Amino acid sequence: MRTMAFLAMTAAFAAPPLLSPGTFVRDDEPTVGHAGPQSVPATVPSALQEPLAYTSSPVAATTYKVADSTLIAMQSPMGPMEFTTVLRATLAVSFEADPAGFRATAEVTEFTGATGNSQTGTRSIGGSAVGGALVAVVGPAGLVELVDTPERSREASQFTVFEELGYDLFPTMPARVVAAGDSWTDTVTSSSTSGGARTSSTSIRTFTVGEVVVVEGRSLQMIGVSATVETSTEMEQGRMAMEQSFSGTQTGNFFWDAEAGLLRAAQLMNDFTGEAKMGRAPATSVTLKRIQRIWREY
């Protein structure tokens, strides 16, 4: 039962069906209401005519929605088991000038979450479990410093998305004029301690310029991402030391809004394998699949 509790602390909810690479999520329900963007004719101006970079004066304020779901599967002594969590969050983002570019404060105004496993069912986690703001300093090429992340209760400590979210809201840009097919690479490292769990992650991301798409009359630059990721979590439950490690790939797309100078939307998919270990017990092989969707409201 302790193995179940540990894995449930770091798992996520069964993922909804994947969207096609060119699909854009735009409404309050992460699994429905997606609009299929249309390719932009060559005569329509695109973001490629200007440097792909953050400016020092983005919109005055905006709102981002986040939907994150993960499924961990393992073979336990009791047979196959699955552990899940899901979250949805709303962030009200304000901007102010900073010597590096601008400072973004993304306050968590709404949060809902749930954890569960195939043996005991699902348990909801209320909005009071997460509060505060993600604060980031952003320069022309992206995130310069992650100043702060939202506070989480112990029961919400498994939602590590907030340590990574700054890099997903403000992904690395080349800060120069680019053409379709151009690529650039960045390494992202993050670490956190929350609710007794210590988590670290390293991701080597390669971004590739794709086509320009039109959504609701606005041109968006699609940027593909492919990454290799390593992540590990350590914690103690009672007097039992627990460890979990994963490695694998992340793929997906960012949709860049050149008019606003900000991300419009993103869909990221993780496919990991790894192992979990409790105390002196043998390590157990596990797999992890995760989908994260981000979209900005106009």
Image: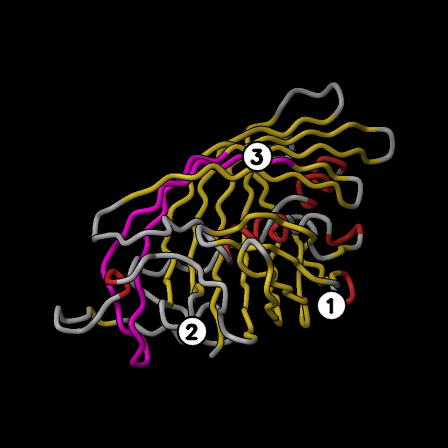
| Rendered position, 216 above or below 146 | below
Amino acid at pointer 1: Gly
Q: Which residue is mark 2?
A: 26
Q: How far apart are the two marked residues, 1 and 3, measured between alpha carbons? A: 26 Å
Discs 2, 1 touching: Cβ within 8 Å: no
- Regarding mark 2 in the picture, which secondary structure is present there? loop
One can see residue 118 in this view = no
Query: Vertical placement of 84 versus 32: above or below?
Result: above
> Which residue shows up at 33% across the image and 74% down it?
35
- Look at label 3 and name its amino acid: Thr
Residue to which mark 1 is pinned: 127
Residue bearing the label numbered 3: 231
Is 120 situated left or right of 231 in this image? right
* Magenta-drawn stretch contains 70: no
Identify the main secondary structure in magenta.
Answer: strand
CA gap between label 2 and label 1 equals: 23 Å
The quadrant where residue 257 appears? bottom left
Q: Position of residue 176 (x, y in %)?
A: 32, 51
Quote the CA–CA distance across marks 2 and 3: 30 Å
Instruction: Give the amino acid at mark 2.
Output: Arg
The magenta stretch is 200-229
Query: Mark 2 or mark 3, which has the lower sequence index?
Result: 2
In the displayed structure, would residue 213 be above or below residue 123?
below
Furthest residue toward right? 238
Q: Earlier in the sequence, mark 2 or mark 1?
A: 2
